Amino acid sequence: MIDHITISTEAGSFDAIASGPEDGRPVLLLHGFPEAAIEWEHQVAVLGVNGFRAVAPDQRGYSPGVRPEQASEYTVTHLVGDVLAMADSLGWDTFDLVGHDWGGAVAWWTAIEHPERLRTLTVFSTPHPAALKVALQSDEDQAMRSQYMRDWRERSTEKRMLDNNAQAIKQMFEWRIRPSHVEEYVQRLSEPGALTAALNWYRAGKAHGAADKVGVKTMYVWSTEDVAFGSFAAFETEKWCTGPYRFEMVEDVSHWIPEEVPEAASSLILENLN
């Protein structure tokens, strides 16, 4: 049901998983940190069965074929550029975009800057960038939750995360997702240069401009046990969406929504697409 494909772009070749008919309505799914395309295995398979052409790439730094060394090559501009380049390579003029965690941030910025390319937007966990900025300025709880983003820019982070058989990475998932996925993430990030490339997303610097409102049809899904994003930013997000907007709050689920409750996540994506 799931194929492994390569997407060729000027930046290099992205590894990806895919499912569904080649002429199906296209859906691109973007993973977060410290994950990879297999985060979306369940969703890609379900979308394929429902006639969509679903593709989930290993993004910049996670695909060995697109792993520049400099942190400056992991800015939002580069990451959004990758989304458009992959879509172009796949022959998609317009497509549906889904993201989680860092992939959610990239999805928001793609919708902000290139709304003409998107049919719908579905984001798990990550609030609209402007909503998060307001929360960081106004909500002490969110400021504390986001401290890790600054801590991980330190050069000692790689060693700390990989010490003791990568125990720190394993603990991030709170024992909420499939152990086989956790092991694969650890294995991938233990490859020379892989974890540094993934952390360069945090080290690349601030976004290049103010985040405008999103007019694309949007569904934002937030979970009550998310340790990274609190309720302030979650509820603030609606103010930054001018098109059809749906907010879904998932009770008693952690940050890792697509993997912890894959069936529910797949159903929500299908509802937004339809």
Image (cartoon, grey):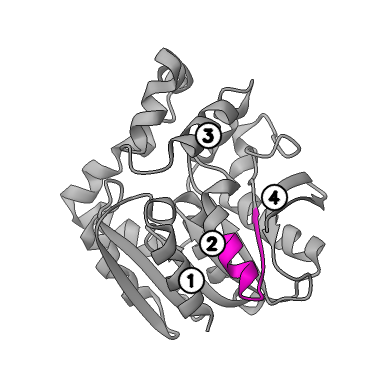
Q: Which mark is residue 185?
A: 3
**What's the residue at 33%, 69% (across, down)?**
237
Q: Amino acid type of disc 1?
A: Ile
Q: Which mark is residue 43?
A: 2
Q: Residues within 10 Å of mark 1 (few under 14, many from 20)?
A: many
Give the secondary structure at mark 4: strand
Q: Nearer the viewer, mark 1 or mark 2?
A: 2
Say whether residue 14 is magenta.
Answer: no
Which is more N-terminal, label 4 or label 3? 4
Residue 204 drawn at (x, y percent): 54, 39
Give the secondary structure at mark 3: helix
Q: Residues within 10 Å of mark 3 (few under 14, many from 20)?
A: some
Which is more N-terminal, label 1 or label 3? 3
Q: Are marks 1 and 4 in contact (CB under 8 Å)?
A: no
Q: Which residue is mark 1?
A: 269
Give the secondary structure at mark 2: helix
Q: Amino acid type of disc 3?
A: Tyr
Give the answer, above or below, for where 56 lies relative to 274.
above
Q: CA distance from mark 3 to mark 4?
A: 15 Å
Which is more N-terminal, label 2 or label 1? 2
Q: Are marks 1 and 2 in contact (CB under 8 Å)?
A: yes
Q: CA distance from mark 3 to mark 2?
A: 18 Å
Can residue 46 be seen here? The reply is yes
Q: CA distance from mark 4 to mark 2?
A: 14 Å
Q: Are marks 3 and 4 in contact (CB under 8 Å)?
A: no
Range of magenta residues = 43-56
Q: Amino acid type of disc 4?
A: Ala
Q: Which mark is residue 16?
A: 4
